[in-house]
Each structure stands twice: as structure tokens, then as C-alpha cells.
Amino acid sequence: MSLWLLNHFSTFTLSLFAVGGTVLLSVAGSVLLRRRYPSLARGEHNDMVGVTLGMFGAIYGIILAFVIVTLWTQLEETQTIVASEATDAALIARDAAAFPQPVRAGLDSAMSGYVHAVVEDQWPRMRGGNPSYGATEVHLQAAYRVLQTYDPKSQTEQVFYEQAVGHLNDVASQRRARITMARQELPPLLQALAFGGAVVLVPLTFLYGLRKLRVQILFIAAVSGLVGFSLLLVLVLDRPFAGDLSVSPAPYREGALAQYWTR
């Protein structure tokens, strides 16, 4: 469900639904409850409700902060993985210049096919929540075969050969890490705590009575708006390859890899 929302609606539209919808529903619920029970406006139970709100608010705030920081850290790690994979691929492209023409051509062909497969095949799959090794495996194996069948003829070639093999191993490792990150999502228990906590906390604010309706509406709107924005962050950050704030495949088109997109 979250993937469908992120891939079909902009972050601005989602913010209108998440924040605006939460505020409207909360204000409407508070006004209706106040009309149904006019005695709430006198604030006879504010002491008890205030203590309960404080306790629930503190616990829920800690949970939300933990979830958001975890998801933000995951997003940064994913960006680092993507950048590292693209950097290693670019270094292989640079190392290939030290080899004879047949080897250089073979590596260029394999790495060109690899970066195209990452951007054009894997990225749409990761956005849709269905990541797979796909066509990248064919091109990665082609690069390995080029290096496995070549015997360096000089000390210079030996140095670049060892570097190319190391970078190729790193590409394979980073690819696996990237696909693993694309498959991850917030555990169901934390999802229940994040979204279920809002269902408990926001209605609880309806019981805090204030004599002036306008003041109470502002109070309810402020709390529900903050909760709605926090839940929007959870939704947007949970999937690093979907939505407007997703990780970009731009590193695979830049630097030494740009040559593979101009042919």
C-alpha cells in the first residue's frame, strides 16, 4: 500500500492527505464530541487527562523519534551504497584503459551493459518493491570472464588488473547490499506502534476541555498536525527507492560512467 501511494502521488499531495486530513478529522471529531458532551468544555477532568496525555505523548514521541531516525539512517546508508557501487564501476572503467584493446573493449561492453541494466531494469523493479538481480547478473559475469581469461603481461598491467578485480568484487557486494535495502521495510510491530499510537493519542486530546472553542480547535489542530507530519515522514522514508525523496540513480550516469550514455 505504501509503495502504491509513493509511486502514484507526489510528496506534496501525500502531505495534504496525511497532515491536512489528520487535522480536519481531528478538529471535526473534537467539535462533535464537544457538542455531544457539553460538560467537557468545563474541563472537569483536565487534571487526569493532562497526566494521561503527558504519559502517552512522551512514550509515543520516543517511539516516533526512534522510527524516524532509524529510517533516515537507512536512507543515508542506501545513498552511500549506491554511490559506492557507481564509484567502483567508474574505477573499473578507468582501469580498463591500462589493458590491451580486446580486454578494454570487453570490460567497457560489460560495464556499459551493467550500468544500463541497473538504471533501466533494476531501478523500476526496486521502485515497485520487486527487486531482483535481473540483467545485471549477465553483464557482471561477462566482466568477470574478461578478467579471468586475461593474463597481465607487465607490472603496470598487473597492478591495474588487481585493482580492477577488487573493484569488480566491490560492485557485486554493493549490488547485493542495494537490493537488500530495497527489500527492507519497517517491521509490522513498529508500523503498528507508529500508526496505532496516533489513533490512541489524537482522540485522547478531545477529552481535554477548554472553555473557548477556538482555543481548543487550535490545540487539537497543532497536536494532530504534528502527528500527521511525523507519520508522513515514516511513510516517505520507509521506502528508499520509491517516491519523490527516493535515492536517485544519477551516480550511474556521471563521471567516467557518462561515456556509456553518450554512445
Image: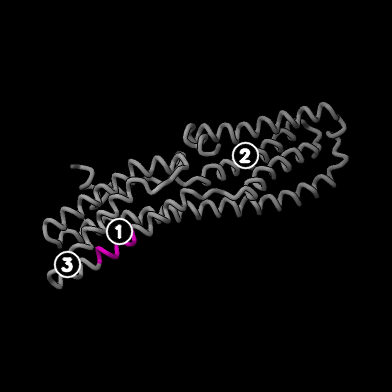
Distance from the alpha carbon under mark 3 to that under mark 1:
22 Å
Q: As rendered, which of 130 and 123 lies closer to the eye? A: 130
* In this rendering, position of residue 129 left or right of residue 153: right
Q: Position of residue 235 (x, y in %)?
A: 55, 42
Q: Please identify, in this view, whether the residue under mark 2 or under mark 3 is nearer the observer.
A: 3
Considering only order in the chain, which callout, 3 or 2, is on the residue closer to the N terminus? 3
Say the numbered circle drawn on residue 151.
3
Q: Please identify, in this view, whether the residue under mark 1 or under mark 2 is nearer the observer.
A: 1
* Quarter where residue 173 is shown: bottom left
Residue 86 to residue 33: above or below: below
Q: Residues within 10 Å of mark 3 (few under 14, many from 20)?
A: few
Residue type at numbered disc 1: Asp
Q: As rendered, which of 23 and 198 lies closer to the eye? A: 198
* In this rendering, position of residue 249 left or right of residue 62: left
Q: As rendered, which of 57 and 200 lies closer to the eye? A: 200
Q: Quadrant of the C terminus?
A: top left
Helix, strand or loop under label 2:
helix
Q: Residues within 10 Å of mark 2 (few under 14, many from 20)?
A: many
Q: Residues within 10 Å of mark 1 (few under 14, many from 20)?
A: many
Location of mark 2 (residue) = 228
* Quarter where residue 45 is shown: top right
| First to last magenta residue range | 163-171
Distance from the alpha carbon under mark 2 to that under mark 3:
61 Å
Residue at position x 22%, y 56% from top? 93
Residue 165 to residue 216: above or below: below
Q: Please identify, in this view, whether the residue under mark 3 or under mark 1 is nearer the observer.
A: 3
Location of mark 1 (residue) = 88
Residue at position x 72%, y 33% from top? 217
Say the numbered circle drawn on residue 147.
none
Q: Position of residue 157 (x, y in %)?
A: 16, 68
Helix, strand or loop under label 3:
loop
